Amino acid sequence: MVAPQTSISSGAVRLAGKRAIITGGGHGIGRATAIEFARQGSHVAIVDLDEAACQETARQIIGLGGTCLPLAADVSDAGEVDQCVASVVDVLGGVEVLFNNAGVMPEGTALTTDMATWQRVLDVNLKAMYLFARATIPQMLSGGGSVINTASVQGLLGHPNRLAYVTSKHGVIGLTRALAADHAAAKVRVNAICPGTIDTPMLHRELEKAPEDERESLLQSYRELHPIGDIGQPEDVAHAVVFLASDESRFITGAVLAIDGGYTSLVVHE
Ligand SMILES: NC(=O)c1ccc[n+]([C@@H]2O[C@H](COP(=O)([O-])OP(=O)(O)OC[C@H]3O[C@@H](n4cnc5c(N)ncnc54)[C@H](O)[C@@H]3O)[C@@H](O)[C@H]2O)c1
């Protein structure tokens, strides 16, 4: 775990004073959301396996005048999760928002996914969300809170060659609804988001598996899968997460929000 870094936040109002934990905050959707949260007045703690990336997100937030506590940890390790949440409570004084977002996406069918890969994907993409929920929800019981879980369009639909990933993301939606039912009376809201294809390092790792001269046409095919005609940017997800974290969404819990340019709205893509 790395040393806490803090600075003064100013000027924003939608998440003013809210203390948030964002997992997978070192890259992609998590980093963009952490930065947007800080712009909106939230005190942010980010948890990521990649310590250098974690520090870089913190540097960017502090450069904007925000507050950031970077924590290098594996979200699938119960001891590390408990230690992270204890550090956040110690430094920030509590937690009102949890963005469960870290994830991994290996390929494989039932015939090509080994036990270690299956276990790792379920541990990082699903078990970690339970670990963070059980560690943070007690902090939210007196004053309410918001938990946002990153599923995927692959939590709503199947996809070839992604057995463990699709399974884990469908599980995220079940976990979200169960948590929402358990904690609504305490004003702890729990919602899931289902991004379509988003322009992050995860997408670029996928593209890099194709020969270099085929990558642009592969990217174009991803754009065309989304009726809106483009893939999303991490900020498109960040803005939706800000809404779900804010009091503007106070009557929304157990919801599953597609952020997918219409990907899941069509039976047949033309
Ligand atoms: N990019 C997309 O097209 C897309 C679409 C739908 C859903 N998602 C989901 O959005 C989430 C974020 O994806 P992204 O595209 O920003 O990915 P990314 O790979 O760009 O970023 C994921 C971050 O999670 C961190 N991480 C991975 N395993 C971890 C672990 N065990 N402990 C702590 N941190 C860990 C990584 O270090 C990385 O910083 C994931 O849950 C992913 O499944 C992404």
Image (cartoon, rainbow, N blue to C red):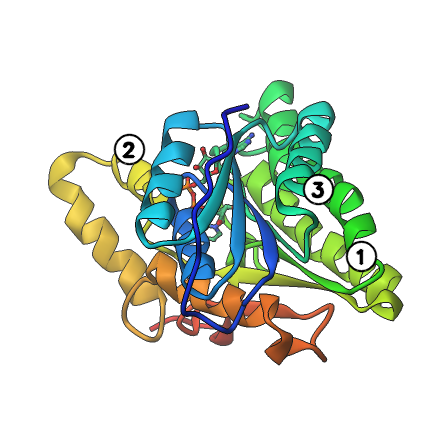
Quadrant location of the N terminus in the rendered image? top right
Q: Nearer the viewer, residue 107 or 75?
A: 75
Q: Position of residue 177 (x, y in %)?
A: 77, 61
Q: Would you place residue 220 above or below residue 169 in this image?
A: below
**For the residues carrying marks 2 and 3, which lies nearer the camera in this image?**
3
Q: Position of residue 250 (x, y in %)?
A: 69, 77
Q: Amino acid at mark 2?
A: Lys
Q: Earlier in the sequence, mark 2 or mark 3?
A: 3
Tell me the residue at 62%/19% (across/down).
116
Q: Amino acid at mark 3?
A: Phe
Q: What label sits on residue 209 in the rendered view? A: 2
**For the residues carrying marks 2 and 1, which lies nearer the camera in this image?**
1
Q: Would you place residue 133 above or below residue 9 in this image?
A: above
Between the residue at mark 2 and the residue at mark 3, the CA separation in whole angstroms equals: 32 Å
Residue designated by label 3: 132
Q: Nearer the viewer, residue 270 or 260?
A: 260
Q: What label sits on residue 179 in the rendered view? A: 1
Q: Earlier in the sequence, mark 1 or mark 3?
A: 3
Q: Amino acid at mark 1?
A: Leu
Quadrant location of the C terminus in the rendered image? bottom left
